[in-house]
């Protein structure tokens, strides 16, 4: 019996296993970095999740490497995904490669003996927020059907609003430019 279970599903696909994981989760962190490919991939993922009838309110947005580029600022990323999630991001973690690499090379978790408050404080804040989310009652969980998942994966992405923002236009035209 565990109080917290973390499943790291980098770029998850929508299938029966991830569907059950999502259904049984009280909260799901979607981690995005401020680059156009990550934003587009995450946007398409949320559209598939929505078409599969998963509750988007379970998702929390985290912007990792938040200061990576001045081209796509955190505020812009937050406002773009607010349309999907109907809430703002839960955390922004700055890009501090020297602190992270140093922790990795020493084999010590950055939260344990890290010196970079720029990274540690947002991570601690995120953990505190996540621990306040009430647990889910597994007995009341509705497991999504395979048909919903299959339809969501095969359906083409759709625009969420009739009047796209410039950012949405950039995201929808990106595949044509490649």
Image (cartoon, grey):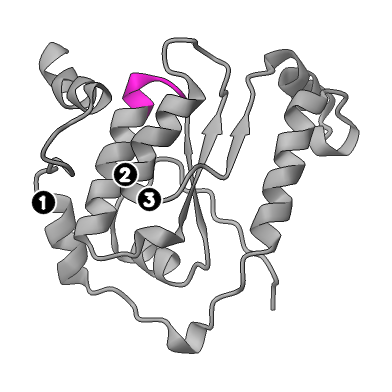
Q: Determine whether, in the image, residue 143 is placed left or right of residue 150.
A: right
Instruction: Identify the image quadrant of residue 152.
Output: bottom left
The residue range painted magenta reads 34-38
**Does dot 1 land on a helix, a strand or a loop?**
helix
- Camera-side residue of 150 and 66: 66
N-terminal of the pair, mark 2 or mark 1, is 2
Identify the residue at image location x=23%, y=21%.
Answer: 166
Residue 46 % position (x, y) = 30, 47
N-terminal of the pair, mark 3 or mark 1, is 3
- Camera-side residue of 173 and 162: 162
Screen quadrant of the N terminus: bottom right
Identify the residue at image location x=50%, y=83%.
Answer: 138
Residue 156 % position (x, y) = 9, 44
Q: How crowded is the residue under tag 1: few (<14 C-alpha within 10 Å), some, or many (20+)?
A: few
Q: How crowded is the residue under tag 2: few (<14 C-alpha within 10 Å), some, or many (20+)?
A: few
Identify the residue at image location x=36%, y=58%.
Answer: 56
Q: How crowded is the residue under tag 3: few (<14 C-alpha within 10 Å), some, or many (20+)?
A: some
Please determine whether, in this image, residue 41 is positioned above or below residue 132: above
């Amino acid at each position: 019996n565990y109080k917290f279970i973390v499943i790291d599903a980098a770029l998850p696909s929508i299938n029966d296993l991830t569907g059950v994981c999502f259904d049984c989760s009280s909260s799901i962190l979607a981690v995005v970095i401020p680059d156009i490919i990550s934003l587009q991939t995450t946007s398409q993922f949320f559209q598939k999740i929505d078409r599969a009838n998963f509750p988007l309110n379970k998702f929390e947005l985290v912007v990792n490497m938040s200061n990576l580029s001045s081209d796509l600022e955190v505020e812009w990323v937050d406002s773009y995904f607010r349309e999907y999630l109907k809430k703002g991001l839960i955390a922004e973690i700055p890009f501090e490669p020297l602190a992270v690499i140093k922790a990795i090379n020493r084999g010590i978790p950055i939260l344990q003996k890290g010196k970079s408050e720029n990274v540690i404080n947002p991570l601690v804040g995120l953990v505190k927020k996540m621990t306040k989310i009430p647990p889910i009652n597994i007995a009341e969980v509705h497991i999504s059907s395979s048909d919903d998942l299959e339809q969501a994966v095969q359906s083409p992405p759709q625009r969420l609003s009739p009047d796209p923002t410039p950012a949405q236009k950039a995201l929808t035209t990106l595949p044509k430019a490649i």
